[in-house]
Amino acid sequence: MNSASATRLFELVASAPDDRPMLIAQGRRLSYGDMRRQVASLASGLGHIGIGRGDRVAVWLPNDPAWFTVVLACSRIGAAIVSLNVRLGAKEAGELISRTVCKAVVLMPQHRDGACVAALRSVPAALRDSLRCVVTHGETTEPILCGVEQTSLVQLAAFELKEVPESEPSDPCLLIATSGTTSQPKLVLHCQDSVCRHAADVAGAAGIGDAASSMLLALPVCGAFGYTVAMATLQAQRPIVLMESFEPAQAAALIIEHRVTHMLGTNDMLDKLLAATTADRPFPSLRMFGHANFDPSLTELPAKAESKGILIRGFYGMSELLAGFAAEPADAPLQQRAEAGGVPSCPTASFRIADPESGAVMADGEIGELQVRTPNRMREYFMNPRATAEALTADGYFRTGDLAYRAPSGAFIFTSRMNDVLRIGGYLVSPVEIEEVVASDAAVQTCQVVAVTRPQGVRPVAFVIAEPGQVVDEAAVLAMCRARLAIFKVPIRVFTIAALPMIDGPNGPKVRRVALRERAQMLLNAETSSA
């Protein structure tokens, strides 16, 4: 089967030439033919232990070739994977296993000195009573969970091959938690046919597909961003150079060694990649770096990257839509390509910018909620029909919860999450607007702005990290803000801190804005009480 007509994930690798490289990882190569044989063996082995259509398997693996084998084998038999970050603790992992009623969990006992094993053992029995089997990647003689069957990927692949009932295109294939910081994140359910369509759309939008294309994948494959990049590259049947985790110097060396043509990641990854080399044109093979704008303070990065011969393009996505719902056109001006957003990668998708309160469609240039319609969105929030219904408008648009505006070019520009937006003086204010002004001070390395409630109303507060050896002059920063921003947007204080409070998200660390708001309130209250 040609990958262009694939409607199930395992079909993405069905027609590639047997000897074409699929994965280059850990110093070895795995071909598409190798993967097909491994997937067939593992699918049969999973069937032998009672895993089949409609079941759910927790995949608790790092970026490793085995992740691909497990995901594609589950696709073949109609089991959905529950994607677990290897940095999850016992509480988080246990709740996800319990809420999705996982029948098996696949993990690597040696990874991170056995952290996943320790976490699984610490999960209360009531939260893991659905588990019937623990499958290890790597042999171990040590029982992981007493009373639970244990096997390994090697042992499953050694079973006698047997025909197993295959999946249907509409079968669920992925359950992934939203990246919110609440104790009960919603669970997004995606199906095989929509993921395959989306993979084709993203591959086309990113320009992966010709005989020389290849992808460096350093994003966690457990997250929506890394998962999408993996599936899009498989859809194009091109090689993936896989990193267990992003390390700038190693990434730079891999791009050069393997003549990598494409990379997608966060803008701070690109910043660190460029810092790892002093060459004027360090990566002549790299045609594109597709970025998500995770660090808004890196305002000079786009021009710096282009001066070094790297075409950057902003992308946009979220767990419910997967990454790459939209991409900035390759021929757009740099100022536009530097922004997250773009035009939908799916030719039948559409978007609009709506007033968050009235629902009225906004004029070009006005910030409102981004609402999208695409055949490739999630099917539902798992076991949460109320949340699913609330996420959709009456005419079928998905409410992203993101703020954006439509540019004159017809593309949209993402500004911030609605939950992050500051409501000051009766106006919706994106913290990014303030952060960019504060971060333009030469002594400021990075900035985060939160809103706090004071007697005079809601006001912004800025937290900054200083450049090494520099001291941030608060008075000078505030004066610059007063000169460049509306008065209600000017922070009431600029606090210098050593580090931002972070939390691990599926696509990497995220700033804990709630913790920053609490800290701002505490500092301001202390100043008031001592005055």
Image: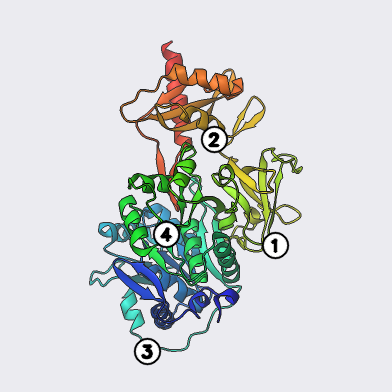
Residue 320 in view here: no
At 46% across and 49% down in the image, what residue appears? 266
* Of the pair 52 and 99, the residue shown nearer to us: 52
| Residue with the most extreme top position | 531
Q: Quadrant of residue 418?
A: top right
State which quarter of the image contains the C terminus. Answer: top left
In space, the residues marked 1 and 3 are separated at their CA atoms by 44 Å
Residue 18 in view here: yes
The residue tagged 2 is: 432
Q: Quadrant of residue 215?
A: bottom left
Estimate how packed mark 2 is, as few (under 14), some (14 to 19) or many (20 or more) residues with alpha carbons within 10 Å.
Answer: some
In space, the residues marked 1 and 4 are separated at their CA atoms by 32 Å
- Reply above or below: 51 against 247: below
Q: Amino acid at mark 1?
A: Thr
In space, the residues marked 3 and 2 are separated at their CA atoms by 57 Å
In space, the residues marked 3 and 4 are separated at their CA atoms by 44 Å
Q: Is residue 237 left or right of residue 120?
A: right
* Of the pair 484 and 354, the residue shown nearer to us: 484
Contact (Cβ within 8 Å) of mark 1 with mark 4 = no
Question: N-terminal of the two: label 3 or label 4?
Answer: 3
Q: Nearer the viewer, mark 3 or mark 4?
A: 4
Label annotation for residue 285: 4
In space, the residues marked 1 and 2 are separated at their CA atoms by 31 Å
Q: Amino acid at mark 4?
A: Ser
* Secondary structure at numbered mark 2: helix
The residue tagged 1 is: 348
Q: Nearer the viewer, mark 3 or mark 2?
A: 2
- Reply above or below: 413 against 212: above
| Residue with the most extreme left position | 141
Give the image location of residue 333, x and y in percent: 59, 45
* Of the pair 328 and 222, the residue shown nearer to us: 328
The residue tagged 3 is: 160
